[in-house]
Image (tube, rainbow, N blue to C red):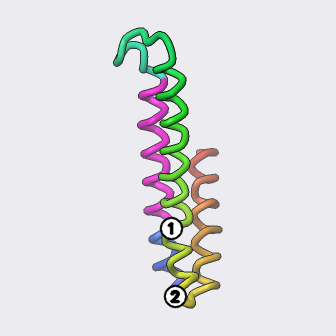
Amino acid sequence: MKNSRILKHSLINSLLAFAYIFIVSQILTNGERLFGKVQGVLAPTAFLLTFVFSAAVMGILIFGRPILWYLDGFQKEAVKLVIYTLGLLLVILFY
């Protein structure tokens, strides 16, 4: 498998992860303005559900395709994809 294909997939995964993180952070930052003041058990429950859902989404974006590639016999490519994806996320972080 060509490195350019691996890099393309890692770039797509990194950009999708960044977009998802950005959207969730905007919702959390503007939550009171969007949803009003929430009292009681609903706010902590919604936050924890968002946290669990976000962990699942990030797991799929970062490790989904590499796991499939690994199981299909492309072990080296799968490891490269994870490393490239995490590397690009670091580049996005420090940019």
Q: Which residue is drawn at the image coordinates 64% and 45% (left, top)? A: 94
Q: Is 23 positioned to the left or the right of 85 in the image? A: left
Classify mark 1: residues with Cα within 10 Å, few (<14), some (14-19) or many (20+).
Answer: some
**Front-lying residue, 74 or 51:** 51
Residue for badge 2: 72
Which residue does the image show at 58% across and 54% down from the upper left?
Answer: 89
Q: Looking at the magenta stretch, what is its main secondary structure?
A: helix
Q: Is residue 26 magenta?
A: yes
Picture layout, residue 88 above or below residue 37: below
Task: Give the residue pinned by disc 1.
Answer: 64
Q: How far is mark 2 from mark 1, CA to CA?
A: 13 Å
Magenta span: 10-28
User: Is the C-beta separation of discs 2 and 1 under 8 Å?
Assistant: no
Quarter of the image for residue 79 reads bottom right
Amino acid type indicated by mark 2: Asp
36 up-or-down from 94: above or below: above
Q: Secondary structure at mark 2?
A: loop
Task: Tell me what residue is drawn at x 48 percent, y 63 percent.
Answer: 11
Whichever of labels 2 and 1 marks the residue nearer the N terminus, that label is 1
- Nearer-the-camera pick, 4 or 71: 71
Place of residue 48 in the rendered image (x, y in percent of width and height, measured from the top left): 55, 33
Q: Quadrant of residue 71?
A: bottom right
Name the outermost residue toward the front: 41
Q: Which mark is residue 2?
A: none
Q: Quadrant of residue 73?
A: bottom right
Task: Estimate the x, y position of residue 22 in percent, counting from the top left.
Answer: 46, 38
Residue found at x 45% / y 35%: 24
Residue 39 image offset from top left, x and y in percent? 47, 10
Question: Residue 92 placed where, x, y %?
Answer: 56, 49
